[in-house]
Amino acid sequence: MKPTLYEQLGIIIPGSILMFGLVLYYPELKLLTTKDAFSVGELGLFVLIAYAAGHLVAAIANALEKLFWWNGMPSDWVTHDPPALLSADQVENLRTKVGTRLNITIAKMAGYDQKKWWPVSRQIYADVGKSGKPDRIDTFNGNYGLNRGFASSCLVLTVVALAHADWLIAVGLFAAACIYGYRAYRFGVHYARELYLQFLVL
């Protein structure tokens, strides 16, 4: 099965970065990374290892995500009072369209339970996808996953650098993690806004 955009960007590439970084400190992990060329089988093995390492990175990112989005995921911001992400009129139009298109009645968006809103937002994505307009949304999601993965990989390598007393390298990696975290924040916001705007124009 062909990897999705999210798997390619958010899993495999950060996993590869983590592997190459670890090889610098643990040469016994070189395995395939020092070869000048790959056979088809070796390339396949490398992708599998990168995929596994990427899921480790994703697990770390998932653990940190609740702290990162302390104010709720961007897709939940439409339930804030006052609303964020969209204007008040757009949020009201969103509430109305959820009722007419998805047959889900919401009396008031402001203060709506985020745990109840999460499956509604997933249904909105499914509806947009069914209508054939998920490309920009998926691009933002893929770039969010990519930068989130880079940030997590840099944090892991920061810990490794600190363990080896490479202070300057650790500072550089931590700074990179902050930059990638900021990029992830921006793409996460773009993803949520694009999701609801595409739904409103269906």
Image (cartoon, rainbow, N blue to C red):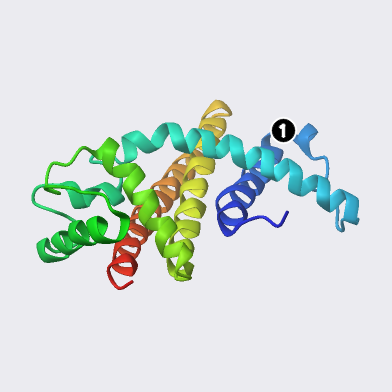
Residue 109, position as x, y percentages in the image:
15, 49
Residue closer to the observer: 37 or 100: 100
Residue closer to the observer: 153 or 53: 53
In this rendering, position of residue 29 left or right of residue 183:
right
Which residue is the extreme one toward the bottom? 201
Label tally: 1
Residue closer to the observer: 86 or 146: 86
Which residue is the extreme one toward the top? 163
Q: Quadrant of residue 112?
A: top left
From this view, report whether residue 136 is shown above or below residue 16.
below
Which quadrant, please, contains the N terminus?
Answer: bottom right
Q: Residue at x 23, y 41 (%)?
A: 71
Residue 138, position as x, y percentages in the image:
48, 62
Which quadrant, please, contains the C terminus?
Answer: bottom left
Q: Residues within 10 Å of mark 1 (few under 14, many from 20)?
A: few
* SS state under label 1: loop
Question: Which kind of residue does numbered mark 1 sit on?
Answer: Tyr
Q: Is residue 97 visible?
A: yes
Q: Quadrant of residue 70?
A: top left
From this view, report whether residue 173 is shown above or below residue 185.
above
Residue closer to the observer: 138 or 152: 138
Q: Which residue is mark 1?
A: 26
Q: Residue at x 49, y 44 (%)?
A: 173
Residue 149, position as x, y percentages in the image:
51, 46
